[in-house]
Image (tube, coloured by chain):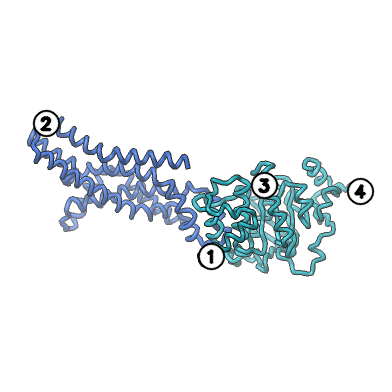
Chain colours: A blue, B cyan
C-alpha cells in the first residue's frame, strides 16, 4: 500500500500510540503542576505570585526541545539512566504545567470580583468562596482554552524526537530512512497527527460557542 | 419657613427620629466615624443610631459617602476614625471576626451578584449550608420559606440568567434573609432596574419593613424613602447634613437638601 508494507504502516501507528501516551502524560502532569501554579499566580501572597511567575517565565523562555535535552541529559549526569519516555514526560509536564497554569490563572481572574465580595458578605470562608463560588465559574471558562491547548500538547510531543523517544515523528523518521519515501511517509504521519488533533479543535470551538451562548 | 444657609455643618439638623426615643440599644451606632480613600476624606465624622426594627434611608448625591457609610457597617470598608458598633461589635477596634458579623448583617447589591452557576435554591442555601451547617432537608425548607417571602417560591429550580432583573434582585434579598440576619443593608438595589421592575423589589422591601426587619438602605427612590423609612438621612460631602422623618423631604431645612429633592421629587 502506497509503496509501504503493512508492517511499516503498523510501525507508524505504534509510534502514534506512544505520541498519545506522551500527550496524556503531559496533560496529566501539566494539570498536576498547572493547578498549583494557577492558584499561586492568583494568590494574595506576593511571594507565591513571584515564585510561580518566575517558574512560568523560565519554562516559557526556553524552547521545548531544549527542555527535553536538559531534562534527559541532566538526569543522566546525575548518574541515573532514564528512559526517554520519563525524560520526555517530565519535559512535557514542565511545559504544559507552565502554560496551563497561566491559562487557568486567567480563568480564575476572569470571574468578577463582585462574586468574591458576594461570598464574603455571606460569611463564607475564603476556601469556601474559592471552592463553591469561584472555581465552578472558572472551570466553565477554562474548558475551551484547555481543550484547545491539548492540541498544542499533542503536536509538541513531536519534539521528543530530539531525545530519540519512539513516537509518531520518530517512527516516521525511521521508516523514511529505510524506504526513502519521505513525502509518502511524512504525509501519512501528518494525516495521523491531524486525525488526533482535529476532533479536539472541533470540540474546543464547540465548547467556546456554548460558553458564549450561555 | 426659615431658610438656613449652612457652611459645612458643625452638627446636622436633627428632626425628631425614632432612634432618639427608642429604649432599645441601637443595632448600629456611628460616632464621629471617619473614612479616607488615600488623601480623600469620604466620611468626615458620621453620627447615627439605628434601633432594632428601624428602617433608615441614606440619600444624597453620588460621592456624598452614603454607600461608603453602608459598606462600613458590614466591614467591607474599614473605619479610619471614630467608633462604629454593629450588633454589639466594635468595628473600629479592628479585632472583630468579620465572618461572625456577616451572619448578623446581610447586604444586597445594586448588581445582585447572584452566583450564576447555581440555581435559585442553591444560591439561597449555599451560605446557610456551608456556614451554619444546616442539613439538606432544612435547607430545602429554608429556601421555600425565604423565596415565599419575596414571592418567588416557583423559581427555586431556575438559574439566575432565566430571571428578570427584578426577580434576580428579589432572589438576592432572599439569599440575605436565609441567614436570618438582624440587619440588612441595601446598596442602591433598584438603580439597575427599569421603573417597572423597581416596583416589585420595593414592595418586597416594604413588606420586610412592616415585618420589623432592621434595614439601612442607600436609595435614589425619594418617594419610597419618604413613605417607608422611619428615618431619612441626607448625606452631603461626607457628612450627615440633615436627618429626620420622611416628611423632612417635603420641608427641607438646608439649601443642599432643597436642591437635592428639587431634582428628585
How far apart marks 1 and 4 lie (CA) works out to 53 Å
Query: Would residue B10 be visible to someone looking at this image?
Result: no
Crowding around mark 4 (Cα neighbors within 10 Å: few <14, some 14 to 19, many 20+) is few
Q: Position of residue B199 (x, y in %)?
A: 70, 47
How far apart marks 1 and 3 lie (CA) works out to 28 Å
Q: Which mark is residue B190?
A: 3
How far apart marks 2 and 1 lie (CA) works out to 68 Å
User: In the rendered structure, which disc, 1 or 4, sits on the residue that comes first in sequence?
Assistant: 4
**Residue farthest toward the right in the current orientation of the protein:** B1
Vertical comparison of A150 with B36: above or below: above
**Which residue appears at 14% of the width and 38% of the height?**
A173
Q: Position of residue A12 (x, y in %)?
A: 15, 41
Q: Which mark is residue B2?
A: 4
Q: Chain of mark 2?
A: A
Q: Is residue A170 left or right of residue B122?
A: left
Q: Which mark is residue A2?
A: 2
Q: Position of residue A56 (x, y in %)?
A: 36, 48
Whether labels 1 and 4 belong to a single chain: the reply is yes
Nearer to us in this view, B202 or B222? B202
- The part of the image, by quadrant, that contains residue B87 is bottom right
Nearer to us in this view, B185 or A5? A5
Nearer to us in this view, A164 or B99? B99
Vertical comparison of A155 with B34: above or below: above
Q: Do callouts 2 and 4 mark residues in contact (Cβ within 8 Å)?
A: no
Mark nearest the camera among 2 and 1 is 2
**Which residue appears at 21% of the width and 47% of the height?**
A69
Q: Which mark is residue B131?
A: 1
Amino acid at each position: 500500500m502506497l509503496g509501504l508494507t503493512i508492517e511499516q504502516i503498523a510501525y507508524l501507528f505504534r509510534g502514534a500510540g506512544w505520541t498519545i501516551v506522551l500527550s496524556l502524560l503531559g496533560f496529566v502532569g501539566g494539570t498536576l503542576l498547572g493547578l498549583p501554579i494557577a492558584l499561586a499566580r492568583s494568590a494574595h501572597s506576593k511571594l507565591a505570585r513571584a515564585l510561580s511567575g518566575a517558574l512560568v517565565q523560565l519554562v516559557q523562555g526556553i524552547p521545548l526541545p531544549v527542555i527535553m535535552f536538559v531534562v534527559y541529559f541532566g538526569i543522566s549526569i546525575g548518574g541515573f539512566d532514564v528512559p526517554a519516555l520519563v525524560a520526555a514526560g517530565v519535559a512535557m509536564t514542565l511545559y504544559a504545567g507552565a502554560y496551563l497554569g497561566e491559562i487557568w490563572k486567567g480563568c480564575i481572574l476572569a470571574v468578577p470580583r463582585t462574586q468574591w465580595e458576594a461570598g464574603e458578605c455571606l460569611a463564607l470562608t475564603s476556601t469556601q468562596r474559592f471552592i463553591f463560588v469561584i472555581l465552578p465559574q472558572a472551570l466553565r471558562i477554562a474548558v475551551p482554552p484547555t481543550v484547545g491547548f491539548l492540541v498544542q500538547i499533542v503536536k509538541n510531543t513531536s519534539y521528543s524526537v530530539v531525545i530519540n523517544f519512539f513516537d509518531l515523528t520518530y517512527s516516521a523518521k525511521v521508516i523514511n530512512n529505510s524506504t526513502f519515501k519521505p513525502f509518502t511517509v511524512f504525509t501519512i504521519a501528518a494525516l495521523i497527527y491531524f486525525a488526533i488533533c482535529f476532533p479536539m479543535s472541533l470540540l474546543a470551538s464547540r465548547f467556546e460557542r456554548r460558553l458564549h451562548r450561555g | 419657613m426659615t431658610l438656613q444657609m449652612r457652611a459645612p455643618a458643625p452638627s446636622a439638623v436633627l428632626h425628631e427620629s425614632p432612634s432618639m426615643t427608642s429604649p432599645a440599644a441601637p443595632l448600629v451606632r456611628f460616632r464621629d466615624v471617619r473614612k479616607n480613600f488615600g488623601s480623600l476624606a469620604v466620611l468626615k465624622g458620621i453620627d447615627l443610631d439605628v434601633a432594632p426594627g428601624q428602617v433608615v434611608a441614606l440619600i444624597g448625591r453620588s460621592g456624598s459617602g452614603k454607600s461608603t457609610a453602608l459598606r462600613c457597617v458590614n466591614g467591607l470598608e474599614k473605619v479610619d476614625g471614630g467608633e462604629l458598633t454593629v450588633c454589639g461589635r466594635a468595628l473600629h477596634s479592628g479585632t472583630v471576626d468579620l465572618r461572625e458579623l456577616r451572619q448578623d448583617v446581610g447586604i444586597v447589591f445594586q448588581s445582585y451578584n447572584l452566583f450564576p452557576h447555581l440555581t435559585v435554591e442553591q444560591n439561597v442555601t449555599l451560605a446557610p449550608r456551608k456556614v451554619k451547617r444546616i442539613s439538606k432537608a432544612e435547607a430545602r425548607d429554608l429556601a421555600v420559606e425565604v423565596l415565599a417571602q419575596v414571592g418567588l417560591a416557583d423559581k427555586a429550580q431556575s438559574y439566575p440568567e432565566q430571571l428578570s432583573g427584578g426577580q434576580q434582585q428579589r432572589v438576592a434579598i432572599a439569599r440575605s434573609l436565609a441567614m436570618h440576619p438582624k440587619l440588612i443593608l441595601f446598596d442602591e438595589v433598584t438603580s439597575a432596574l427599569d421603573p417597572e421592575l423597581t416596583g416589585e423589589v420595593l414592595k418586597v422591601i416594604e413588606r420586610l419593613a412592616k415585618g420589623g426587619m432592621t434595614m439601612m438602605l442607600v436609595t435614589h427612590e425619594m418617594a419610597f424613602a419618604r413613605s417607608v423609612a422611619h428615618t431619612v438621612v441626607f448625606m452631603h460631602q461626607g457628612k450627615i447634613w440633615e436627618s429626620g422623618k420622611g416628611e423632612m423631604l417635603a420641608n427641607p431645612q438646608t439649601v443642599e437638601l432643597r436642591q437635592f429633592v428639587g431634582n428628585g421629587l
